[in-house]
Amino acid sequence: MDCVATGGNVKVLAKAIHSLSRIGEELYLEPTDDGLTLRAVNSSRSAFACFLMSPLFFQKYQAPPDQTFRCKMPIKSVQTVFRSLSSLERSVEKCRIEMNTEKSCLRIMLHCKYGLLKTHNLSFQDCESLQAVFDKDNCTNVLQAQPRLWVDTVLHFPPSLEEVCVSVSGDRVWLRNHVEDAADSSSKAMMTELCLSSEEFDHFAIGSQTSITFCLKELRGLLVFAETAGLPVSMYFEEPGSPVVLSVSDSVLEANFVLATLSEEAHQRNPNNNKADESRVEHAPDDFMCDDIDSYLIAMETSDLAGPSHQPQPQPQTSSTNHKSRLLSDEEEEEESVERPPNKK
């Protein structure tokens, strides 16, 4: 494999690596004629993420002759190459990725200003294909909004919050923090709830009123990428216990995050969620869940299928509400000093 990314696509590639690092500890690579696929899955297999970058994303793309080749490596080693996003944008002109299957080595070369070349040789090991089983095209509920709306909404929740509840009705969306168990009484736990009108969304299609609860960490990771790429974020979901799919795509790349949701049986055992439902406005649905993230896993499989699910995006509608607020602050990044031209003798 030999591919070259230039300009702003180098930062997009780096952001994809950082987003996948929030999911799992290993990065799965699969280069094919359809493009370069990057995947990650968490240890409990309740969260799966996949990026597919088509050949048009790269200035040069050459797939390996063996279309069945797949490999994996520690994601932290790859993240180290792109650790300072501000420095990449400031000094890196292009990124070249070469794969030597005979030596089990992945070479990443950063061509910087003033003729400076940084080369990183990373070892990898062969693996089988990693693929999640999901069908977002048949989901009854679909929400699509610009990343700014999602970012401004998530900012109301503390970084330590692990799970968030999303409830939908015919013309509203509610988001609130998830109370873990009966030990967290209303006098001790702070409840945060936001209500969004359907007019805030580019696309709003609700087939059934429902509530789902899923981990917030993975959503934050996707939003960091989506805001950098300037792509709208779509949410596909059905009933409690079924996976929720978060997706962004354009003509040259596609990203899908498949997250586990809490089962409806778990909700019925949590009295705190029942109390919160009683105080909800009249348009809100009545059913919420409780937390039991280990009670089920996303259906995952190891197969020979390559690439993520390709499904058409809903046609966006013009939003009648302008949503403005402060920018999302990226995670703290190590700043590198600006490279200077080499001293001439």
Image: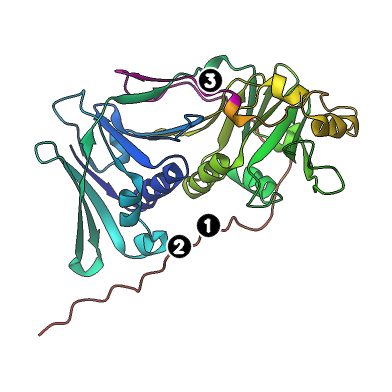
Residue 249 drawn above or below residue 161: above
Task: Name the quadrant containing residue 171.
Answer: top right
C-alpha distance separating marks 2 and 1? 8 Å
Report whether residue 119 is seen.
Answer: yes
Q: Nearer the viewer, mark 2 or mark 3?
A: 2
Q: Are marks 2 and 3 in contact (CB under 8 Å)?
A: no
Report whether residue 319 is seen.
Answer: no
The answer to whether 212 appears left or right of 5 in the picture is: right
> Predominant secondary structure in magenta?
loop
Q: Which mark is residue 330?
A: 1
C-alpha distance separating marks 2 and 3? 34 Å
Mark 1: amino acid: Asp
Residue 305 drawn above or below residue 221: above
Residue drawn at the location 77% of the way across and 29% of the way down: 270
**Label 2: which residue?**
333
Q: Which mark is residue 126?
A: none
**Label 3: which residue?**
136
The answer to whether 236 appears left or right of 168 in the picture is: left
Few, some or many C-alpha atoms within 10 Å of disc 1 (few <14, some 14-19, many ≥20)? few
Residue drawn at the location 71% of the way across and 50% of the way down: 156
Point out the stretch of residues depicted in magenta.
Answer: 295-314
